[in-house]
Every structure is written in structure tokens, then in C-alpha cells.
Image (cartoon, rainbow, N blue to C red):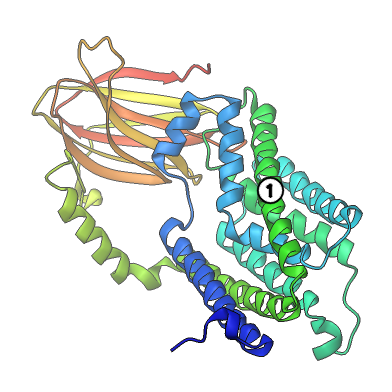
């Protein structure tokens, strides 16, 4: 039976508080790990479509929501403001971090510098561990050395965080027209999200700082950050190993893909081609997708007709939408069959309606990308290859 709060001694209240705090932190930590699994990397097709239809305000909104859901960035910010008490110090360090991540966000995106997001996020995980290790005075306590200059470290780690933000931004359908405004809008959204989160963090820390158990709270919080950063590092390195050595994961991927195919095979007219090398292709089309540009290529296919296709780029991955437009439609309706970001794709399609069927490719790199498309089956070449007009 629990002793009523009014009848508890200060020692009992402190112990109960510590237990509650541990449960709270453990719950938050579990939530972060589950969020990692649930959201992983990448951006949904719904978000991409929303950006296409929206303007700079949409980029700003996505920047704010990305920061507010970016647990690794927020954990880092939470760590380095933990023991800051004056407005001057808070403004100084937050500004340094903002300058750091803004430089690489803008520069990397504007110049289409794309780093492996697993490696970037692994380093960000280590930055969370580093800042929490500094908070517990780990360099002096465990390594018997003076810690590095905090201001320089905040700027340097901010530069790394900026590469992570740029990786997310470059998943959006950016265009050469208005590119700088898109980047600035996204960055403004990032800062608005950061300010919102920072305000809440400061209120929470200020409230706990008045408590006689703040020292216990700070130790638990920072050791939790150290563990969380370490686990994030291991998880991201596992993801990097997955992308760097995909052959080690063929069995798992094949089973998952098989299950996915079973669940959608009755819903989608697109089927996988098992042996592309054995197909005697009828037509080969070479398509140049301009830098930071878009292109469509279409075939005319009658209802019930089937054709096979295989396309690949000269190396760069492209976002694509394999879709069809019904003949005679004047409403702008189209049906998407398959969307992804890849450097190649194969399959076959049996048309469920008569009309144009083909591909939309989006090139986010600074150089043109050559797509080699091979087709065979029941279709008519429309020779319809057009660059999408920018609004």
C-alpha cells in the first residue's frame, strides 16, 4: 500500500520522484526508438505530392514539422542548453548551432551534395552522446583531460546536422526555378520548429531547476542521452551496412518483397519481370532528364493490352511515377501504378483502360541523367517526351 503524499518524509518523496522520473524517461526513450522504426528514412509520396501542389509556405511547414519530429536534433539541442541559465548564453550557443546547420543545409542543397543519410545520422547520434558526456563532465572525470572548446564544437556539430537536414530537403521535388527560395523557406521552417521546441525545453528545465532533485534529474537525463545517442549510432550504422552491402540482406528483402507482392497483386496491374535478359525487346528509347528537371515519356496502350518494360539510368537515382492517363479525359485525372526513387525498374503492365501509359522522372542532381528505356508488347509509341512546365 502506498503512503499518502502528505504523510511521506522528504526522503520518501525524493525516492518516489526518482522512480517516476525514471519511468517517464524510459517511456520517452522507448517512444523515440519506436519512432525510429516507424518513420525510418525517406518521405511519403503524399508529402511529395503536397510539396508539388504547394508553394514556399509548404516548404516552411515541412521544415518546421521535420524539426519537431527530428528526435536526434532535438535531443542534441536539449543537451547543450541543459546547464545554460542566462539568456545571453542561450542565445549565443543556439545562434552558433543555427549558423552551423544553416551553412551546410543551404550549401549542400544548392550544390546537390548528397551524403549517405545513415552515416550522417550515425554521426548525429554520436553528437547527442558527446554533448551529454560533456554535461556530466566526463572528460575530466573519466578521461582526466580538459573538454574541447564548447563553442567550436557546437558550430562543428551544427555543420554536420546541416548535412542531415539537407538530405531530407533533397528528398523533396526541388526545381532549379526558385531553388534558393525553397531552401530558405525550408530553413526558416526549421528555425521556427527549433524555437518552438526550445521554448518548451527551457520551461521544463527551468521548472526542474527549482526542485531539490534537479541534480538527480540532470544525471538521469544526461545518462539517458548518452545511451540514446549510442543506440541511434548503432541503428544507423546497421542501416548503412544494409545499403552498403545489400547482398547480405537478400533473403530478408526477398521474403518481404514476396509478402508485399502477394498483398497487392490483385490490386495493381503492374507485375514484376523475372528474367529481363531473356526478353527480345522491340524498342529502345534514350531519354535525357535535365539537371534539376522533370520529364515524361508515354506509350499509347489499349485496354486489356500488355507490355513489358525495363529502364535504367547511367548511375544516378531518380524519383519516378509510373502512371496512366485515360484517353479522352479532360479533367487531368491519372492513375499511379508505381512510385519510388531508383536507378532502374522492370515490370509489365496490363492496361485497365485505354490511354497514355508511361513514366514521370524527376532529377534532383546538378547534371543531366540518361535513361535507357526498353519496351516490348502491345502499344504504340507516342514519341511524347516533354519537360514538365514549372509553375
Residue at image mark 1? 194
Residue sitting at 71 percent across and 46 percent down? 195
Q: Residue at x 68, y 48 (%)?
A: 194
User: Horizontal placement of 219 versus 30: left or right?
Assistant: right
Q: Position of residue 325 (x, y in %)?
A: 25, 21
Q: Nearer the viewer, residue 50 or 348?
A: 50
Residue in the picture at 57% in, 70% down = 232
At 46% from the left and 58% from the top, the residue drawn is 40
**Is residue 360 in view from this perspective?**
yes
From the viewer's perspective, is 149 left or right of 270?
Answer: right
- Estimate the x, y position of residue 23 in percent, counting from the top left: 52, 77
Residue 246 sits in quarter: bottom left
In this rendering, is residue 116 above or below 222?
Answer: above
Number of on-image labels? 1
| Res 111 visible | no
Residue most toward the left? 304
In this view, the residue in front, 95 or 371, is 95
Coordinates of residue 267 in the picture (x, y in percent): 15, 42
Give the left or right position of residue 343, taking residue 236 as reference: left
Would you place residue 191 above or below residue 17 in this image? above
Amino acid at each position: 500500500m502506498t503512503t499518502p503524499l502528505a504523510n511521506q518524509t522528504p526522503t520518501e518523496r525524493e525516492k518516489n520522484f526518482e522512480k517516476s522520473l525514471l519511468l517517464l524517461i524510459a517511456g520517452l526513450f522507448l517512444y523515440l526508438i519506436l519512432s525510429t522504426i516507424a518513420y525510418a528514412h525517406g518521405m511519403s509520396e503524399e508529402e511529395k505530392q503536397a510539396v508539388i501542389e504547394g508553394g514556399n509556405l509548404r516548404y516552411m511547414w515541412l521544415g518546421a514539422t521535420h524539426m519537431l519530429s527530428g528526435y536526434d536534433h532535438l535531443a542534441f539541442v536539449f543537451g547543450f542548453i541543459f546547464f545554460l541559465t542566462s539568456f545571453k548564453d542561450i542565445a549565443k550557443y543556439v545562434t552558433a548551432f543555427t549558423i552551423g546547420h544553416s551553412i551546410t543545409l543551404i550549401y549542400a542543397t544548392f550544390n546537390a551534395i548528397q551524403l549517405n543519410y545513415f552515416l550522417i545520422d550515425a554521426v548525429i547520434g554520436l553528437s547527442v552522446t558527446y554533448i551529454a558526456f560533456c554535461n556530466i563532465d566526463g572528460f575530466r572525470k573519466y578521461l582526466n583531460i580538459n573538454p574541447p572548446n564548447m563553442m567550436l564544437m557546437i558550430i562543428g556539430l551544427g555543420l554536420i546536422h546541416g548535412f542531415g537536414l539537407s538530405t531530407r530537403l533533397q528528398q523533396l521535388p526541388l526545381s532549379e526555378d526558385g531553388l534558393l527560395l525553397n531552401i530558405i523557406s525550408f530553413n526558416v521552417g526549421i528555425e521556427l520548429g527549433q524555437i518552438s521546441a526550445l521554448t518548451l525545453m527551457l520551461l521544463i528545465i527551468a521548472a526542474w531547476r527549482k526542485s531539490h532533485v534537479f541534480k538527480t534529474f540532470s544525471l538521469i537525463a544526461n545518462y539517458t542521452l548518452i545511451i540514446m545517442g549510442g543506440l541511434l549510432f548503432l541503428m544507423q550504422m546497421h542501416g548503412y551496412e544494409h545499403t552498403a552491402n545489400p547482398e547480405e540482406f537478400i533473403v530478408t528483402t526477398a521474403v518481404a518483397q514476396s509478402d508485399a507482392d502477394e498483398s497487392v497483386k490483385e490490386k495493381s496491374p503492374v507485375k514484376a519481370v523475372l528474367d529481363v535478359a531473356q526478353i527480345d525487346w522491340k524498342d529502345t528509347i534514350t531519354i535525357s532528364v535535365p539537371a534539376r528537371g522533370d520529364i515524361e515519356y508515354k506509350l499509347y496502350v489499349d485496354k486489356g493490352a500488355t507490355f513489358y518494360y525495363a529502364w535504367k539510368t547511367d548511375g544516378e537515382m531518380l524519383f519516378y511515377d509510373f502512371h496512366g492517363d485515360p484517353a479522352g479525359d479532360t479533367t487531368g485525372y491519372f492513375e499511379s501504378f508505381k512510385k519510388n526513387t531508383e536507378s532502374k525498374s522492370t515490370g509489365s503492365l496490363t492496361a485497365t483502360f485505354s490511354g497514355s501509359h508511361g513514366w514521370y522522372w524527376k532529377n534532383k542532381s546538378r547534371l543531366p541523367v540518361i535513361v535507357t528505356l526498353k519496351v516490348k508488347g502491345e502499344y504504340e509509341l507516342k514519341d511524347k517526351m516533354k519537360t514538365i512546365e514549372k509553375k
